[in-house]
Image: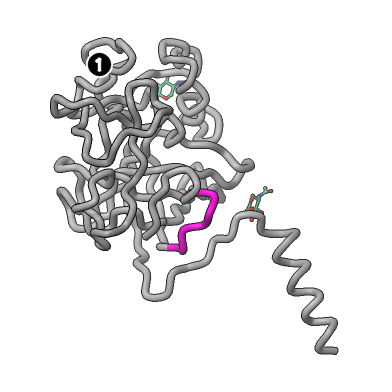
Amino acid sequence: MKLLLITLTVYYTVEVSSISLTPLENGITGTGKTTRYWDCCKPSCGWAENLRDKSGTPIRTCKKDGTTTAGTSVQSACAGGESYTCNDQQPRAINSTLALGFVAASFTGGVDTNMCCACILLSFEGELQGKKMLVQVTNTGSDLSSNHFDIAIPGGGVGIFTQGCSSQWGAPSNGWGQQYGGVASADECSQLPDALQTGCKFRFEFLLNVSNPSVKFEQVQCPSEIVDISGCTY
Ligand SMILES: *[C@@H]1O[C@H](CO)[C@@H](O)[C@H](O)[C@H]1NC(C)=O
Ligand SMILES: *[C@@H]1O[C@H](CO)[C@@H](O)[C@H](O)[C@H]1NC(C)=O
């Protein structure tokens, strides 16, 4: 009997859950709002001093090509430097109900680096009910309210920092599409560089063009699938 139970457990783990979504003990939960942005700037969790564990590894940031890792002390392109968001921090669908991505977030309202690199499972409500997105906090923002997740989606609008994408990709001075909200269709994603188009289309495919869906959220352990991309452990 004991042997049989062990066999079943192993089978379940391997076959049903290819990405493990394990709630973090004493982690935070709640309801929140989402918006979207992609400003090409160095995310603030790319600075070691913004991590809870100052000796930890910050979020990977990139040189102008969006793929070569930039040094952690290189200033953001949005503050006169040469460090940008890495292309691989764009969102991706794992299947029709689960996606993986990165967010600027605030839990307290305003700049909130306390949660840098935390992983959060967002469960969309309303029209997107049933879809979830596992995100890692890479950034924060002075314009964020509490329990606010600003999902990093290329072509989602540059927001308050207009200079990053023009410097990196020659984007229009207020970004692709509207400064807040970005492009209006998957076709308009063709304005973006090839390397960012999949993430741009994510909004019209996985997110079904639903604008700023509300969410329930739960902090989870960061799975290797996300840490392998960002380099940051919580
Ligand atoms: C999507 O993947 C997750 C995690 O691997 C899994 O739990 C879920 O059942 C999958 N959904 C579908 C529709 O296959
Ligand atoms: C997406 O939704 C917005 C409204 O939020 C609308 O203006 C736009 O036309 C829609 N795009 C598509 C391709 O349906």
| Residue 222 lies within the magenta run | yes
* 226 on left or right of 60: right
Observer-nearest of 207 and 41 = 41
Q: Is residue 33 visible?
A: no
Label 1 CB-ligand 2 distance < 8 A:
no
From what the image shows, is residue 28 above or below residue 195?
A: below
**Where residue 78 sits: x, y (%)?**
18, 27
Q: Which residues are magenta?
A: 220-226
**Where residue 42 sits: x, y (%)?**
26, 34
| Residue 141 lies within the magenta run | no
Q: Residue at (37%, 65%) from the top-left corner?
A: 29
In this figure, which residue is indicated by the disc labeled 1?
A: 167
Label 1 secondary element: helix
**Where residue 212 sits: x, y (%)?**
36, 38
Q: Is residue 50 visible?
A: yes
Observer-nearest of 60 and 154 = 60
Query: For the residue carrying disc 1, how many other residues have a C-alpha within 10 Å: few (<14), some (14-19), or many (20+)?
Result: some
* 158 on left or right of 184: left
* 56 on left or right of 136: left
Q: Quadrant of the N terminus?
A: bottom right
Observer-nearest of 159 and 102 = 102
* Quadrant assignment, res 4: bottom right
From what the image shows, is residue 107 above or below residue 91?
A: below
**Where residue 112 sits: x, y (%)?**
19, 53
Instruction: Give the image's coloring scheme.
Output: one colour
- How many labels, in total? 1
Q: Amino acid at mark 1?
A: Ser
**Residue at far bottom of view:** 1
Q: Residue at (21%, 52%) from the top-left corner?
A: 50
Q: Residue at (75%, 70%) from the top-left corner?
A: 10
